[in-house]
Image: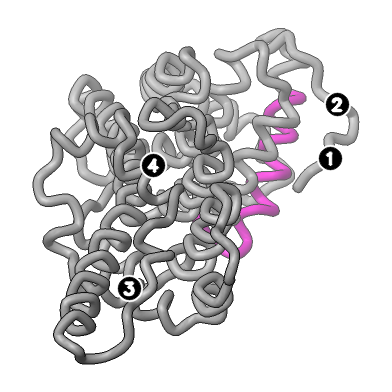
Amino acid sequence: MINREIIRIKIVQLTYAYYQNGNHNLENAEKELVFSLDKAYDLYNFLLDLIVAITRVAQQRYDVALARHERGEGECPSGRFVNNKFALQLADNMMLGEWREHQKHVWDDDIDIVRKVLDNIEHSEIFADYMAQTDEPTYADDRELWRKLYKTFVVENEDIDVRLEEKSLYWNDDKAIIDTFVLKTIKKFEEANGMNQELLPQYKDPDDLDFAVRLFRTSILNAEQYQRYMTATSKNWDFSRLAYMDVVIMQIAIAEMLSFPAIPVTVTINEYLTLAKNYSTPKSARYVNGMLDAIARYLSETGRMLKPVPEKAERQ
């Protein structure tokens, strides 16, 4: 699940913090990197478990409404939503259950958020259309319902975003990416797999944890050399106008270009150009794009990097 996009974001953030905090303990910084990646996987499970929590609160409301009906107060409630096949399968999922066993009070401390999301769901056209169906919903219908509900009421939900930031500093920038993995997980569920349905593994590629640690360590240990490369190639760029975050981003990009021969130069430049757009100043992307292109050519021309550098690399 954790891919190199998330890894690069984490490394940029932690490298910047490494220099800003002044406590240059590389071993501790590496441990914090690994911990932050573990927390990203926790967020994936936490958001999946939100579906279970919403269904649990819906069940409580259904039980209250049914009890009132049995006392002659109101109509008999429909159990269609609380018996949603996908949600019930997710509640019984073995992998999610194992994760939940190591957590304290999953969503119990945030029940107000759960109730608010359920309120919004129950007042939506998506919910009304689903509940109005006369035929018994298929598993595919139930799964599609939750894909729509998650995309509509959890993705870009400001209340959830604020609460997640309060719960963990490591989740500040993770949710948008993790949401895509939750939606992918919903789509891949199959009824026949029952409680043994596999969730996404923590790492998309088994080598990605090694990639993360190597890239972080290399960028720190060779920082002075990499900054000399920046100076040597900055004659057409006003190096003094670069934000410090730009320097950090380029430092890590150089480490990636030199340490991972299988990653094309264009891919590396595009990835860190995106990070400059998202995490630095409005003008950073132009500077970072131009300087990384110049640095790549310098490294190639001086024999320090053997990967080919395209004449006109397509930039994002």
Which of pointers 3 and 1 indicates the residue nearer the eye?
Answer: 3
Magenta portion: prevailing SS class: helix
Amino acid of disc 3: Asp
Q: In front: 58, or 96?
A: 58
Cβ atoms under marks 4 and 1 closer than 8 Å = no
* Left or right position of 272 against 54: right
- From the image, tell me which residue sits under label 4: 89
| Residue sitting at x 32%, y 80% | 76
* Left or right position of 18 against 314: left
Between the C-alphas of marks 4 and 3, the distance is 27 Å
Residue 159: which disc?
A: 3
Amino acid of disc 2: Pro
Cβ atoms under marks 1 and 2 closer than 8 Å = yes
Residue 133 vs 148, above or below: the answer is below
Name the secondary structure under disc 1.
Answer: loop
Residue 72 vs 24, above or below: the answer is below
Cβ atoms under marks 4 and 2 closer than 8 Å = no
Amino acid of disc 4: Gln
